[in-house]
Image (cartoon, helix red, strand yellow):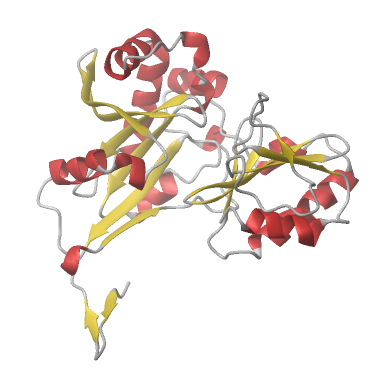
Amino acid sequence: MLILKKTEKELLHLKEKPFKLEKDIQKLFEEHLSLLTPYQLIKSEFTIKNHRIDTLAFDPENKTFVIIEYKRSQNLSVVDQGMAYLSLMLEYKADFIVEYNETQKMTLKREDVDWSQSKVIFVSPAFTDFQIEASNFKDLPIELWQVNQFDHGVLIVNPLKKSKAAPSIKQIKTVPSSALEQLKIEIKVYSEEDHLADKSEEVKELYEDFKQAILRLDSDIEVTAKKVYIAFKKNKNIVDFAIQQRSIKIWINMSKGQLDDPKGLAKDVSQIGHHGNGDYQLIVKDTHYLEYIMSLIKQAL
């Protein structure tokens, strides 16, 4: 990848500056975690049962814990290590909750945590083809994030995407069966298909029309399936969809008073409990107002 900096007279080639220590990557992420990720820092160097976790974080959107590990050099055991950490989290849930309560000065109960959304993230300047392929399972809650720094303070953080044709975790043969069975029971990585599986063809077609219209708004928008909704994101959630039997419930991620909605289609749900992000909700049953709704969603970009 060619990284350039444009000046008034020329293009400067930026050279990569390797991280000297894993600790340098960890310090960078922990000092800027809320900017680099949607997570909040709970504990650095969290030790539990003779295991040391580099960074323990919490995902407020999905109400779950996230473990972040850093690798300066390429390592072949990310899947095995990730599975071990996930099993550790599921076995000692109370310890994670205690750490949250002690460091955040807030009360978090076991039932407040959606353990099924737990994940492990590995951060490294580079991953081998073997590591990428070994973690490329659609229902494996292990993510690889590539981070590189260059001259002039330029930093690139790139979460590696799983392929669209990624197979199931059930095909992993090297993971101990007990660990695999525990993860299959307690952890679930959701997909668009999970939300559409039992829906009518009309609603599926309606979702596809709105999905494609949203993706046309910006080439960097990504689709991420959550437990109760499908999120369209660009650094943050822009809009969330809950697929229903005869309609789609839409939440636009803007605070009350920010949305310019001349037709008054969006309902204020700021004082009402709801699953998606933002204070504005719409329910659509057809594409009659599709272009107008896109003008509303575009305001959240």
Give percent across and percent down for residue 155: 26, 59
Quarter of the rendering containing residue 15: bottom left
Q: Is residue 127 visible in the rendered structure shown here?
A: no
The residue sitting at the left extreme is 20
Count of numbered tags: 0
Rendered view: 272 above or below 214: above
**Residue 4 horizontal/vertical position (percent):** 28, 77
Residue 125, image quadrant: bottom left
Q: Nearer the viewer, residue 284 or 223?
A: 284
The answer to whether residue 132 is left or right of residue 299 is left
Viewer-nearest residue: 278 or 121: 278
On screen, residue 126 above or below 82: below
Q: Residue at x 30, y 14 (%)?
A: 99
Residue 226 shows in the view: yes
Residue 88, picture quadrant = top left
The relative height of residue 185 versus residue 12 in the rendered view (above or below) is: above
> Can you say which quadrant of the picture contains the C terminus?
bottom right
At horizontal 20% and vertical 15% (from top left) the residue drawn is 50
Provide residue 170's location: percent of width, then percent of height: 56, 32
Q: Quadrant of the N terminus?
A: bottom left
| Foreground pick, 60 / 129 | 60
Residue 271 spot, x, y in % from top left: 65, 26
Q: Is residue 195 left or right of residue 170?
A: right
